[in-house]
Amino acid sequence: GMDGPETATTGEFASRLAAARKLVESLERPGEDLDQAMQAYTQAMEELNWCRDYLAKARLKVEQLVSKN
């Protein structure tokens, strides 16, 4: 689903990361339509921004656990 990073699983993180990678690989092939390329960049950025949020929230959870000790 398109849940926010706070309720996400590592599986969703992995699939979004893979999606971003596929988009970037498609951009490295010659003959890419410019509009399509721009769209692919935008979508890859969105996937990676989601991944970054996910990591930031995962890190916060760990910090909270550490500070409880």
Image: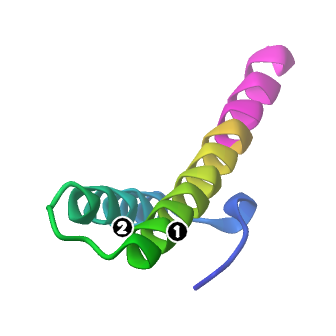
Residue sitting at 74 percent across and 37 percent down?
61
Q: Position of residue 31 (x, y in %)?
A: 17, 70
Q: Position of residue 63 (x, y in %)?
A: 76, 23
Name the colour scheme.
rainbow
Residue 6 lies in quadrant: bottom right
Q: Magenta span covers which residues?
A: 58-69
Q: Few, some or many C-alpha atoms within 10 Å of disc 2 (few <14, some 14-19, many ≥20)?
A: some
Q: Position of residue 54 (x, y in %)?
A: 64, 50
Element on which disc 2 rests: helix
Residue sitting at 68 percent across and 77 percent down?
3
Specify whether 48 is left or right of 36. right
Residue sitting at 43 percent across and 69 percent down?
40
Residue, disc 2: 19
Examine the residues drawn in magenta and state their main secondary structure. helix
Q: Are marks 1 and 2 in contact (CB under 8 Å)?
A: yes
Q: Nearer the viewer, mark 1 or mark 2?
A: 1
Q: Quadrant of the C terminus?
A: top right
Element on which disc 1 rests: helix
Residue sitting at 67 percent across and 31 percent down?
59
Q: Quadrant of the N terminus?
A: bottom right
Distance from Cα at disc 1 to Cα at disc 2? 9 Å
Which residue is nearer to you in this view: 4 or 22? 22
Q: Residue furthest left?
A: 30
Q: Position of residue 57 (x, y in %)?
A: 73, 43
Number of the label disc, if any, that sits on residue 43: 1
Which residue is nearer to you in this view: 15 or 35? 35
Which residue is nearer to you in this view: 19 or 55? 19
Residue 60 lies in quadrant: top right
**Membership of 68 in magenta stretch:** yes
**Membership of 54 in magenta stretch:** no
